[in-house]
């Protein structure tokens, strides 16, 4: 997989000038019309270290994590730094645009971190299809953002943050999510720290820098708890055993690497922490009833 794209490298590759010549505000947020992203270069499948909201019209395939989702018509798509993605256009389109911003552009705006918003949950798709009345509302918001972005108003970024917040809440309200009780007991905190520690090991960008923590016991030792306590916490929070949760996360990353990199099977197996490719093949076949190379045919 390509290395994580930074906000700085994206800007300098797209516009051919150094990012450090911009003011601090303009160096944290960009608005790009859809036709401004069409330059003949393919959009590489990779993670980015910034957030992106895309307003798309036409036929597109969004490759997001280990899934590929086709969208037809007009839609709003939300991307975060945790998940690799690319957008593949299936037909020409001139309507739409993209909002790109660093994490700390909105850091102090929300009471909780924006990656805690339901639209960035691993369990939900990031694409929202729009009805005509909703399309008009999104066009109005993008027009307001464009107008402020191009203005000299001293507090324009406060207004832009308000409009981005409206987009977030529009998406959350449009696709109601099951409300769950989120207690703050010790078991819940332990499960959340485990998940954060697991996610922190991805992406795997080099087979020589492999996935390290693979066993529940290793996680328990790192977290300073008994493995049974960790298992109870994870099962209570996710409904899965610790081993199954780790295995599911490994499978997700394995599919990403098989589909979107040219690494050979051995490199992928070592990168995921398997001692040899035969162990990886057994792991993969046990969960998918097929061998890893089938995903490349």
Image (cartoon, rainbow, N blue to C red):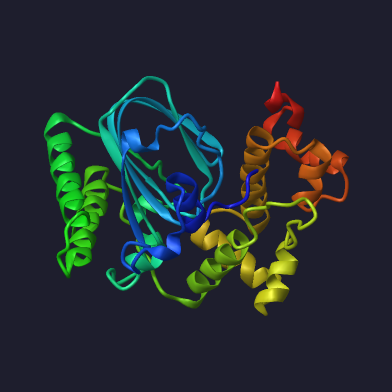
Reply above or below: 41 against 272. above
**Picture coordinates of residue 192, whole percent (x, y):** 51, 67
Q: Is residue 156 left or right of residue 195?
A: left
Residue 154 in percent (x, y) is at 17, 70
At 46% from the left and 48% from the top, the residue drawn is 16
Q: Is residue 81 visible?
A: yes
Q: Position of residue 100 (x, y in %)?
A: 36, 52
Question: Left or right: where does residue 156 sit relative to residue 71?
Answer: left
Residue at 72 percent across and 75 percent down: it is 221
Q: Is residue 57 above or below residue 91?
A: below
Where residue 129 sits, quadrant-wise, is top left
Q: Is residue 143 left or right of 191 when viewed as pictured?
A: left
Query: In the figure, 34 relative to 238: above or below?
Result: above
| Residue 291 visible within the image | no
Query: Considering the image in quadrants, where does the C terminus appear?
Result: top right
In percent of the image, x 39 and y 70: which residue is there?
A: 183
Tell which residue pokes out farthest to the bottom in this image. 224
In terms of image quadrants, where is residue 98?
top left
Front residue of 133 and 35: 35
- Seen from the viewer's position, the closer of residues 125 and 232 is 125
Which quarter shows the N terminus? top right
Residue at 49% in and 37% down: 86
Residue 101: image quadrant is bottom left
How many marks on residues? Answer: 0
Position of residue 134 in the picture relative to residue 83 (left or right):
left
Residue 295, image x, y percentages: 68, 27
């Amino acid at each position: 997989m390509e290395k994580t794209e930074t906000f700085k490298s994206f800007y300098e590759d797209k516009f051919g000038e150094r990012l450090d010549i911009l003011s601090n505000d303009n160096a944290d947020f960009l608005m790009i019309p859809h036709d401004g992203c069409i330059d003949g270069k393919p959009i590489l499948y990779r993670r980015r270290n910034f957030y992106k909201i895309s307003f798309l019209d036409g036929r597109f395939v969004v490759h997001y994590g280990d899934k590929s989702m086709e969208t037809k018509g007009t839609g709003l798509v939300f991307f975060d730094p945790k998940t690799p993605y690319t957008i593949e256009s299936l037909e020409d389109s001139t309507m739409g645009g993209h909002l790109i911003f660093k994490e700390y552009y909105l850091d102090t705006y929300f009471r909780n971190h924006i990656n805690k918003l339901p639209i960035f949950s691993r369990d939900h798709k990031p694409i929202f299809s729009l009805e005509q009345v909703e399309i008009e509302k999104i066009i109005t918001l993008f027009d307001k953002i464009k107008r402020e972005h191009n203005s000299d108003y001293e507090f324009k970024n406060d207004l832009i943050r308000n409009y981005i917040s409206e987009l977030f809440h529009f998406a959350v309200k449009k696709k109601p999510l099951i409300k769950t009780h989120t207690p703050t007991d010790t078991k819940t905190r332990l499960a959340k720290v485990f998940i954060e520690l697991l996610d922190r090991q991805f992406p795997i960008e080099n087979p020589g820098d492999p996935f390290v923590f693979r066993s529940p016991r290793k996680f328990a030792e790192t977290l300073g708890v008994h493995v049974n306590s960790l298992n109870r916490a994870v099962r209570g929070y996710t409904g899965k055993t610790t081993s199954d949760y780790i295995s599911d996360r490994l499978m997700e990353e394995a599919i990403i690497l098989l589909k979107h990199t040219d690494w050979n099977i051995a490199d992928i197996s070592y990168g995921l922490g398997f001692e040899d490719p035969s162990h990886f093949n057994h792991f993969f076949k046990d969960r998918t009833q097929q061998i890893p190379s089938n995903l490349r045919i």
